Image (spheres, rainbow, N blue to C red):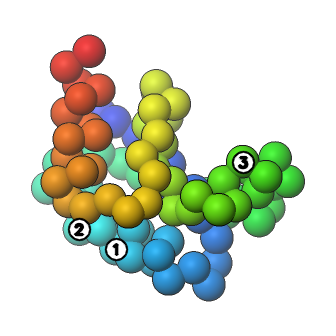
Amino acid sequence: MSVTLLLYGTSACHLCEEAAALLQQMAPELGFTWSEVDIAEDDALTQRYAIKIPVLQQQNSAKELCWPFSHADVLAFLLNDATK
């Protein structure tokens, strides 16, 4: 699976930390890559995501998955894109 995910969040966000831990656990199993984007460093991102974080985005499709999400939700999110 060659999917790259972006995790939008910010520091001192316990939900963002939970989301990052989930992705860290799943990435080796499913073979995707991911990186964190701190919305506090960009006014447009802060405006867009301030009350939604953490938000997972597929970089190639811009498809988003908002919190709360589970292992099963992330798997479905990834598989949905792979079938298109």
Q: Please report contact status of discs 3 and 2: CB closer than 8 Å, yes or no.
A: no
Q: Residue at x 79, y 61 (%)?
A: 41
Name the residue tied to disc 3: 48
Classify residue 30 as left or right of residue 40: left
Classify residue 12 as left or right of residue 70: right
Q: Is residue 36 visible in this depiction of the protein?
A: no
Numbered mark located on residue 60 in the image: none
Q: Please report contact status of discs 1 and 3: CB closer than 8 Å, yes or no.
A: no
Q: Residue at x 19, y 33 (%)?
A: 79
Classify residue 84 as left or right of residue 7: left
Type of amino acid at the residue the image marks with label 2: Gln
SS category of the residue bearing label 2:
helix
Name the residue tied to disc 2: 25
Numbered mark located on residue 21 in the image: 1
Up the image or down, 40 lies above or below 84; here it is below
Give the crowd class for mark 1: few <14, some 14-19, many >=20 residues within 10 Å: few
Could you say which quadrant of the image residue 20 lies in?
bottom left
Q: Please report contact status of discs 2 and 1: CB closer than 8 Å, yes or no.
A: yes
Could you say which quadrant of the image residue 42 lies in?
bottom right
Which of discs 1 and 3 lies nearer the camera? The answer is 3
Give the crowd class for mark 3: few <14, some 14-19, many >=20 residues within 10 Å: few
Judged from this view, the residue extending furthest toward the top is 84
Mark toward the start of the polypeptide (3 vs 2): 2
Quote the CA–CA distance across marks 1 and 3: 23 Å
Type of amino acid at the residue the image marks with label 1: Ala
Instruction: Give percent across and percent down for residue 67.
Output: 43, 60
Could you say which quadrant of the image residue 8 lies in?
bottom right
